[in-house]
Amino acid sequence: MKLRKLFTTDSVELNLESETKDEVLKELIQLLGLDDKSEAILFKTLKRRENLGSTGIGKGIAIPHCRSLVVNELRLAYGRKPEGIDFQAIDDEPVHNLFLIVAPPLEVSNQYLPVLGKIAQFAKDPDIPEKLQEIDEATQFLDLLEERAP
C-alpha cells in the first residue's frame, strides 16, 4: 500500500501552533478526528511510548507511533512545525516534520511496521525535509507523497 493512500487533507496540518512536545502530540492526535475520551487515551499511550525513547529520528523528523484500541484501522497524520520544536530527537536537533501512526492492537493487514519503515525511508531522503518546508497546502503534501514515497 502506498503512503499517499493513508493520508487525507484533513489529517495534514502545515502550521502546528503548539510549543511543547506534549502539546504537539495532542495537536497531531486531533487530526485523527477522534472523540475526547479516545484522544486522552491515545495521548497517554503515545506519552508512554515517548518515555521509552524519543521517536525523533533525526534530520528534523519525528514519527510518534503506537498501537491502541481507540482505532479500528491504521490511521496516520502529518504535522509541520516550521520553526521546529524540541522533541529530544536522537541528533538533538529541533523537529519540523511529524508523522503520527496509530494502529489497532490486532491488525489483519499487518501494515503498522511496514508503514513505519516507509515513512522513515521517505523522510530520510536527503531532499525531502527541504521539500516539506516548501509546501503551502495539504494537497501539495499529498502530491509529494504520491511522487516520492514508497
Image (cartoon, helix red, strand yellow):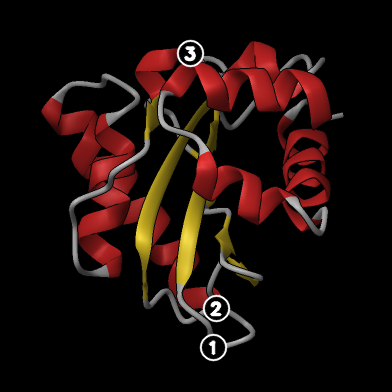
Spatial CA span between label 2 and label 3: 26 Å
In the rendered view, tell whether residue 48 sits above or below residue 106: below
| Secondary element at image label 3 | loop
* Amino acid at circle 2: Ala
Q: Residue at x 72, y 42 (%)?
A: 119
* Amino acid at circle 1: Asp
Q: Which residue is mark 3?
A: 8
Q: Quadrant of residue 84?
A: bottom left
Viewer-closest of 6 and 80:
80
Q: Which residue is mark 1?
A: 92
Q: Is residue 21 left or right of residue 119?
A: left
Mark 3 Cα within 10 Å, few/some/many (few <14, many 20+)? Answer: some
Image position, residue 22 (x, y; %): 25, 63
* Amino acid at circle 3: Thr
Question: Which disc number belongs to residue 89?
Answer: 2
How many circles with numbers are drawn on the protein?
3
| Secondary element at image label 2 | loop
